[in-house]
Amino acid sequence: MDASLRNEGPASAGRTLAYDRESGRLSGARLVERLAVAALQAGSAATAPFGHRGYRLGCKVVSSAVAAGDIAIRLNSDAVFSMPFADGYWSRLLNGRYIYEAVIEAFLRGVSDVDYVFVDGGANFGYWSVLATSEPFGAHDALAIEASALNASRLELNVWLNGGRFRCIHAAIGGADGGFVRITGDRHEAFGTARAGADETGAVRTISLDGLMTKGAIDPARPVVVKLDVEGVEIEALRGAERLSAGDAVFICEEHGADREHLVSRHLMGATSLRLYVFDAAASGFVRVRDLSVLDRIKRHSWVGYNVFATGSPFWEEKLQRMGGGLS
């Protein structure tokens, strides 16, 4: 998939295993696969209080013993998410009690009635795009952007499994259009990027959010929700979204618990006119970040990714301020 809008599905997307998170039903599985799923579920439940540390190792053991290909997770009545069986990151979804990024999910549910465009920056396999475009979340238009070719292939499969209802681009988000990067790292959920030459093997084109808006891929006349999870280049990506941020846009950015300098939030507060919000369990809702000390208190675990919401839009500020007890 090149750096252009794609709606085509893969030539083949066969799958044999399926798990429904709402009913707990596993279909298409032999006994050995049912036992493997039970082990993955138990492992998730046991490691969840510790940020699933050690869970990846257990998944690796299971995957070495059971070669089951892919498994399709039904996230809700209108959302299917495919992943490799015993994937070290996404297999936690087999634990029906586990909620991935609970604050983001609750936010998207809370604004399901808003006619917004969802931009999934660093989409990985497309989890958030699958959810945002589903009926229970408001069936929004979505654009998923992923730099890794391997992840983009899986992303394209999930577009196809969900009826081609969102668009995807294989590219890296940056501060401007026209550069190139290469993918670094060995874990699909934590790939990084490094500058590369245009003729370097595996080079991926860089695009900016403002560039996508100029090309018509993002409609600035509608409210926009941008989820940015681009492994260390969030600040660069925000620099390439100055015109987008001047409209009705809200940016959801990860603040890693291990970063005690709060670099993303520090940039947002010091170098942009955006106003920053974070969910505060003590206040049972979103609070305005006027001082970074609030993040010192909220970011309790070094292994957890926290999320800050940045916007210059009174429309989105009002939505954030109204959200409360349903979040956790």
Image (cartoon, rainbow, N blue to C red):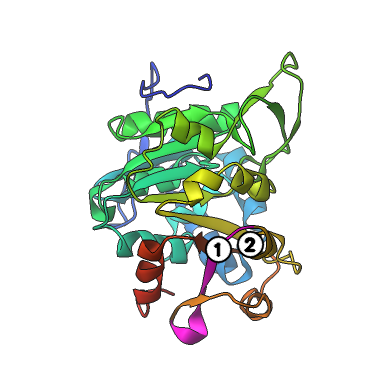
Quarter of the picture containing the C terminus is bottom left
201 or 86, which is in the foreground? 201
Is the C-beta separation of discs 1 and 2 under 8 Å? yes
Labelled disc at residue 307: 1
**How far from the left and from the top, in percent, is residue 323?**
36, 74
Identify whether 85 is placed above or below 177: below
**How far from the left and from the top, in percent, is residue 303?**
68, 64
Neighbour tally class for label 1: few under 14, some 14-19, many 20 plus, Cα within 10 Å: many
Q: Give the magenta-colored segment's residue range.
A: 272-284
Residue drawn at point x = 69 percent, y = 20 percent:
202
Horizontally, residue 147 falls left or right of residue 18, namely right
Horizontally, residue 131 falls left or right of residue 90, namely left
44 or 283, which is in the foreground? 283
Q: CA distance from mark 1 to mark 2?
A: 6 Å
Q: Quadrant of residue 297?
A: bottom right
The mark nearer the N terminus, 1 or 2, is 2
Identify whether 214 is placed above or below 135: above
Q: Label 2 belongs to which residue? A: 255
Q: Quadrant of residue 80?
A: top left
Labelled disc at residue 183: none
Horizontally, residue 185 falls left or right of residue 316, namely right
